[in-house]
Amino acid sequence: MLRRVLPALTAAAVLVPGACYQDDTTAASPSRASVARVLLTDAPFPYDSVASVNVYVVSVSASTDPDTSDDGGWEVVAEPRRRFDLLSLQQGTTALLGEGQLSRKLYRAIRVVIDAGASDIRWADGSEARVSWPAPGSGLITLHALVEEPLALIADASDVEIVIDWDVGRSFLYNYYGTGEFTLIPWLRAVHRAFTGTLAGTVTSNHTGTTQPIANANVGVYGGDPSRPATWYVIATGRSDATGFYRVSFLGSGTYIVRVEQPDYPYLARSTISGVVIAAGDTTTLPVSLQEAGAGGAFLQISGPTSVGVGGSITLFAAVGDASGDPVPNPTVSWTTSNASVADVLGIGDTASVTGRAPGLTTITATSGTLRDSVTIEVTGSAAPVASVVVQPGSAELLVGDSAGFTVVLRDAAGNVLSGRPVSWFSTDSAFVIEGSFGTYVLGRGRRVGSALLQATSEGKTGQASITVH
């Protein structure tokens, strides 16, 4: 039974236990329809000052067509028509959206319709925060879950549960474009609960001489080549509670990279563990101890966000340690940027503000005496939705056994290149099989003589390349 890792986005889907991947567009006629239970869950929300994130879910639908720009062919799975507080759905907690029957087919897309007018974010004092919703900006808004592999429903199998994991921390970005509001750039992923496992453990540190729990540590689960960080892509995220405990649920069977850090404590080095195996139905226990930066010697370490929108600002912190590894209070730090036209930096001591100026990448460097550290910052150019998807190259001819790589370029209606958007890859025929997808890059191989279309979908728009295997 072939299982593939699904990328981390904010959505949940229902599948049937025992379903295997198939190359066919549809399966044989069912003896009965499968009953799908749709559950909603959430990755932990990072903003301590927010009391609730309420989303009014109108309906959840499934489609066999990965191109979600077509409004036809959708089968409604659930119509809850009520509000859900995403902040109450953490550490694997779920809420039932509803249940319905689906045909025996391979579903390649999940659609969630929300009502922006009945949704809101509330600050801790009860006041309502400003939110910039995706197009059309108000009323009914359609969101799509990223589904890399078809969700197969087998008619004679037992009924199943689809989990929509809404990663709130990455979806609602505060002041990302300098507008003083939350911008919703939805991250949804649809997974078959029966095919998923759990990662759990505690985050601690003994930097004070005694072992203590570390609260609010970021736990990131990544796919990609462990030896090539540039290929890493986020699968799911988690956060430790006051006791240091964390749980990241609904991970597909596979091997992952786990990175743990506490950005509020830059004097603690991040911990990266590769080769973490997740098995369906099991819990993998992974305790993590965060060590002092510099391993007991002099150090300088930058912590903070690594992306910002044009016009927005982020804050970076630099922790400096002396020769004994002890943190230096109020250190003298100078800050520079490698490309001021992309992002400029204004630093005061160990704190710096980085403002996005134009789409692109820049390197921010902090220096204190002979110590220095750098971080790459990505500036995204537009909050506009994806308008076009172009796969490059547009065609390829391979021999059986040959491998080929493809990239995708996303643009908004004005032609601006977009980054940081979820991309789903799909091959229409087993003549060309996908061996690994890394966000905007995919690697595949010609398996047999024939032809296939390699399709890339982002925010409902699809582009494709034609592939012939000789």
Image: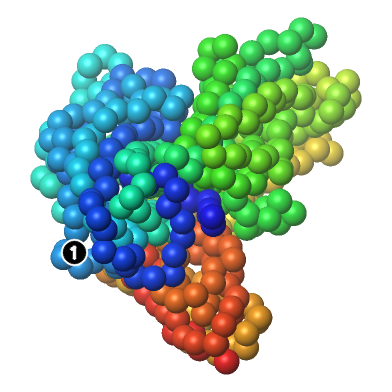
| Kind of residue at badge 1 | Gly
Residue 29 in sight from this viewpoint: yes
Tell me what residue is drawn at x 56 percent, y 45 percent.
Answer: 253
Q: Is residue 320 above or below residue 191?
A: above
Where is residue 439? Give x, y as percent: 51, 59
Question: Label 1, on which residue?
Answer: 73
User: Which image quarter: residue 461?
Assistant: bottom left
Of residue 369 and residue 318, the one placed in the foreground of this image is 318
Of residue 87 and residue 70, the one placed in the foreground of this image is 70
Residue 343 in sight from this viewpoint: no
Q: Quadrant of the N terminus?
A: bottom right
The number of numbered badges drawn on the structure is 1
Q: Is residue 204 above or below residue 372?
A: above
Where is residue 222? Give x, y as percent: 59, 46
Q: Is residue 6 above or below residue 167?
A: below
Where is residue 111? Give x, y as percent: 25, 52
Tell me what residue is drawn at x 28 percent, y 38 percent.
Answer: 37
Tell me what residue is drawn at x 38 percent, y 32 percent.
Answer: 42
User: Which image quarter: residue 366?
Assistant: top right
